[in-house]
Amino acid sequence: MQTPITFIIFNRSQKTEKVFEAIRQAKPKKLFVIADGPRSNREGEAEKCEETRAIIERVDWECEVIKNYADLNLGCAKRVSSGLDWVFNNVEETIILEDDCIPHPTFFRFSEELLEKYRYDTRIATISAQNVQFGRKRTNYSYYFSRYNHCWGWASWRRAWQHYDLTMKLWKEVQEENLLHDILIDPKAVNSWRRIFQSVYDNPTGITWDYQWTFACWMQGSLSIIPNVNLISNVGVGADATHFNSKQKFSFINMSMEAIEFPLKHPLFIVRNIEADIFTQKTVYKATALDILKEELKKKLNYSTVKK
């Protein structure tokens, strides 16, 4: 495989091993590995981080392994964003996987072909593995275009990532000009994303980096490529998860996967699928950052209910 793969790991060796095996089957010639350091207040985490990093030493195919390991814990937002800055300073394009996102084998070829096809098309910012249409076929082609850039298995170019800003400096002006309305139209969606972006803007180095990526793509009017079948399964729910560590009923976690067929059938147009995006907004993004924070508050304070 010619396209570099970027692998983001931390302290979950069992999950990391499963994704590593998928990468091993793809046999990339270049592998970038981003790892955060252990938290000083978590007993035994240093050992878990070392155990997880040791998996990377098992590369047994012809591959240049390039590591960016933090000695101290930077947190999810800083570690992922700074790590991807480092990757895109070294290469023009890459496929990106986190330690809890197991890809279907066909995702690699899917990404590689589309990275080449849209390499110089600035209308496209990202290629996603995730499809959250739950079996609904939105197109007769192999993929459709969306405003949502799902990050559970994705690929992109330096030309797109250069617009990323962890601190979202443009948010104040976007708020003042009410630009989210121009992007989203639907008032409920506007209110939901306004809460999300405001929460991230107020704490940009918190636990998330991907909402800032969505914001950057929207500010450039960019589209994402979504496969017509789901090519990724997130297995990250559990006590050791950063975002989904309670028994939240997110139906898009642990989704089944399906092979995408080759040769790919490319759309003859670049127009986003509004029907698919409306469905995505109503299913995935109804679970806003506020909802997640409320779940965490309920767990920490042992509340039986949290008033919405």
Image (tube, rainbow, N blue to C red):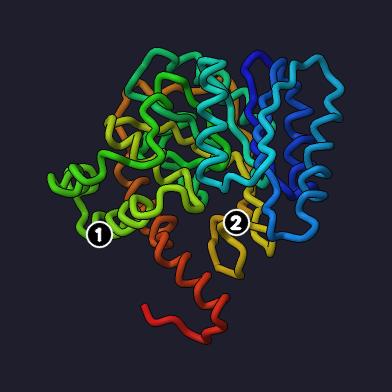
Q: In front: 198, or 193?
A: 198
Residue 102 seen by the camera = no
Q: Nearer the viewer, residue 180 or 176?
A: 176
Q: Along the horizontal axis of the image, is 288 left or right of 135?
A: left
Horizontal and vertical percent position of residue 180: 22, 47
In the image, what residue occupies the spot 41% across and 36% down? 139
Q: Look at mark 1 in the image and give the residue it sits on.
A: 191
Which type of secondary structure does the marked residue at label 1 adopt?
A: helix
The residue under label 1 is which amino acid type? Asn
Left or right: 32 in relation to 249: right
Is 81 situated left or right of 308 in this image? right
Q: Is residue 75 visible?
A: yes
Crowding at dot 1, Cα within 10 Å, few <14 / some 14-19 / many 20+, comes out as some
The N terminus lies in which quarter of the figure? top right
Task: Give the image quarter of residue 9.
Answer: top right
Locate the C terminus by quadrant. Answer: bottom left
Q: Is residue 155 above or below residue 288?
A: above
Residue 261 falls in image quadrant = top right
**Residue identified by numbered label 2:** 242
**Residue 305 position within the rendered picture, expressed as x and y whole percent measured from the top left:** 47, 84
Q: Residue at x 63, y 54 (%)?
A: 254
Q: Residue furthest left?
A: 177
Q: Name the image quarter holding residue 260.
A: top right
Q: Amino acid at mark 2?
A: Thr
Q: Nearer the viewer, residue 26 or 84?
A: 84
| Position in image of residue 7 (x %, y %) | 66, 33
Expressed as whole percent of the image width and height from the top left, the position of residue 251 reads 54, 61
